[in-house]
Structures are given as structure tokens and as C-alpha cells.
Image: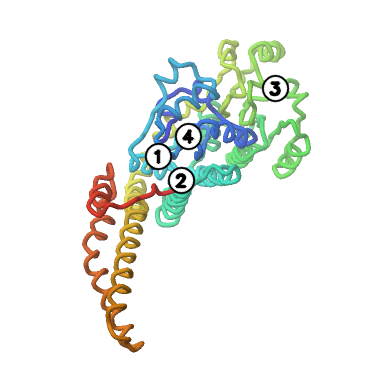
Amino acid sequence: MRICVIGVNHRTAPVEVREKAAIRSAELAQHLSLLHNHAPCGIILSTCNRTEVYIAENDGRDVEKTGLKFFQTYLNIPDDELTRCAYVITNQQEVAKNLYRITCGLDSLIIGEYEILGQVGNALEAAEKSGMVNLLLRHLFQGAIRAGRRVREETGISKNALSVSSVAVELAAQIIPDLSKSRLLVIGTGEAGRLVAKASKERGVTQIAVASRTLERAAELADLLGGKAVDMYNLFDELGHCDIVVGCASSPHALVDAARIESVMKGRPAVPLVIIDIAVPRNVADNVKGVNNVFLYNIDDLTEISEANRKLREVEISRAESIIREELEDLNVWWHSLESRPAVTALMEKAEAIRSAQLNSTLKKLRPLTQEENDYLEAMTKSIVVKLLKDPVHYLKNNAEGDGDGIELIRQLFRLEVEKPE
């Protein structure tokens, strides 16, 4: 059985490429169904920082080609961009290390972010509901989630941790020093929107408007903040009164473009507008950058603040990596056991069949024995088999990694029929 991961992330691809590959929560079941056309088992992990597809197969197909075919067919990335930005990991241990680091918050733009742990759990749950998870993938993701929880419980990496949302507010504070006198518009009422609103309130923002396609949800969040709910149909009227806009709505296409912003700015030419778009796909079209007195930033522009965050957490990163190594060692032990289990079972079953047949044949040639004598012979022959197979079984359990040479050697020596593990 092989496992690999194909993906694009914030280190390999700019937001312009990542948004093409982004899969919203509402679309995940549909894309898992499409993935099933290419592979029997797989899990899709899509966040603002990455889209990754984990595939496990045991039918001899090339998992690397399978994953790339899925990206080419369904994720709207041209071949030249896919070649330039995608990464493929086929070494099983490296696949695990990649997922564990992600789940522990070490591979995020904002080190220690807490949201990723829930996103990995949701990815596993969605794949389970779609019937796309086998034993190998389930154990891999459950192990990563366990490692993520340990890191958050045993280190301080998430203590007072920043999030993409809070970093967006920090960026706004660098541009507009006195946030208390500014008016903020949050587009989106999901988790990111709530975090933006919360961080803004903590930084002293008192005038907050919340826009959403669902006015009830906007009103619910606005009420908590003492702010104002805005229907998406009135979005552009509200833009005329704002100093800062943070876009974090889940939308397949841009909600704001240059033509609309130009129209807004005609009514306030001397008043600058700061727009921070942390959504993937982006809420604000890139051509808005050309509008006079408008300052547009996207999620990739948060790098400077995120690097400062990383330096503050270097000690905790080291502790987290130690936990990851421990958890990966446990995973490797389990993997070796999984790979060797069919061979061990086949070896023990063949030995037991030979032992039982030979004992029965011998008993027919002897005088009738008492039950106690039968029990002695049964125990003795079983003990001989166990002792004879102790070293081969130990060899199998400790040499099942790599290309499977250990299993193949035992299979040929004992002429075993070994089934592939499911």
C-alpha cells in the first residue's frame, strides 16, 4: 500500500494560484466524490494557506499521477502553474511529517494558529462521510490530530497566539495608528470574520459594521459587538463610510472590483480606504490596487508580521518538533506492524496447519491416550512451533518498512500466500 500527498501552499504558490485550488467547505463532499473517480481512498485538506490531497492506494496504480490528474481536471490550475507550484511527496514518512507539522501549527503563515487543528479534523470527518477513508489514512490523520492536541497542551506555541484575522487587524493598526477613530467593515460572518471583529474590538475599534449575504447572521455578530449589520446588497453604500475593510467571506468569486471601488472613492477622494483581504479565494479583485487612495493588501502581505511571530515562538517550535518526532516514531511502529501483519498471519496459520495435521497423524498410530496426555502433546507441539517462528516473526515486525524485501524474503522461504493489507 502506498500513500502520497499532492498540494500547493503559501510557500510554493502565491494567493492567485491558491485561490484557484481552494475548495470551500460547502464544496468538499462534491470534490471528494470527484476524487473517488481517480482513487478509492483520499482526503482533501483545503485552508487559506494550502490545498492538499492525500491519496492511499494498494492496487498498483501510480498515486502521484492520480493526484496530479485530480488537480489538473478539477482544480482549475493551468499545467504550467501546476508544474511550477505543486509539490508531490511520495515517501510515506515525509507525508506523515508534512501532515503532523501542519496540524501542529508549524507550517502555517501564522505559527501556532489554532484553527488548523479543527480544519484537519473536519477534513477527516468529511472524507469518512464520503466513504473515502481506509485504515491507513484514518490512522495517519488521527495521529496528526493527537500530535496537534499534545503540542497545544504541552507547549506554549498557541498561548496568546496570533491568527490570520488578528494579524490583519495588526496590519490595519500599522497603517491607521488610532483605530478608535476609524470605522471598520467586516465582510463575512464565519470564524475568520468573528475573529477579526473580536480582535478589532480589543484594539479599540468602536465603530464596526458586519456585512453578510445572510442579514440574520450579520445582525447576530453585530449585536455582540454593539455594531451595525449590513445586507450585502447595501455593501457599496457602506464602503463609502469606512476607513478599513477586512474581507473574509467564503465566496467562489470576488465581491468587490475596481469599478465599484472607483465609484465609492468619487464620493470621498481625499479620505484613504484600507482594504485587507484575507479570504481565499479573494473577496477583492486585484485590479482594485490601481484605484487612487486605496490601499489593498491580501493574505500574502502579512508575511512581515508572521515572521516576527515566528521569532517570538522559536523555543516553543523546538518543543513542538520534539513532540512530533515522538508521535512519528509511534506511527512508524504501527505502520511496520500493519505491513507485516498479513505475512505474520499467513506464517502462523501455515505452521499451525502443519502442526495440527502431523499431531493428528501421529495420534492415530499410538494407543488411546488420556485427555491429560493429549493436552501435554498439544501444548508441547504448539510450544515448538512458537519457538521456531519467534525469530522469523520478530524479523517481519521489525523489517517491514521500505520496499518490502523482508516480507518477500519470508514469503519465499516459507512459500506463503500473503494478501496485501487493506
User: Can you say whether 237 is above or below 137 in the image?
Assistant: above
Q: Viewed as shown, does residue 364 lie left or right of 178? A: left
Say which label, 3 or 1, has the lower sequence index: 1
Residue labelled with disc 3? 239
Residue type highlighted by circle 3:
Leu
Q: How far apart are marks 2 and 3 (CA)?
A: 46 Å
User: Can you say whether 113 is above or below 89 in the image?
Assistant: below
Most foreground residue, 96 or 131: 131
- What percent of the width, then of the height, locates residue 373? 30, 86
- What percent of the width, then of the height, locates residue 319? 34, 51
How many other residues sit within 10 Å of disc 1, few (<14), some (14-19) or many (≥20)?
Answer: many
Residue found 63% across the figure and 40% down from its top:
194
Q: Distance between the residues labelled 3 and 1?
A: 48 Å
- Look at the numbered disc 1 and give the secondary structure of its residue: strand
Q: How far apart are marks 2 and 1 (CA)?
A: 8 Å
Residue labelled with disc 4? 53
Say which label, 2 or 3, has the lower sequence index: 2
Say which label, 4 or 1, has the lower sequence index: 1
Residue labelled with disc 2? 137
Residue type highlighted by circle 2:
Leu
Residue labelled with disc 1? 3
Residue type highlighted by circle 4:
Val
Most foreground residue, 57 or 194: 57
Q: Distance between the residues labelled 4 and 1?
A: 10 Å
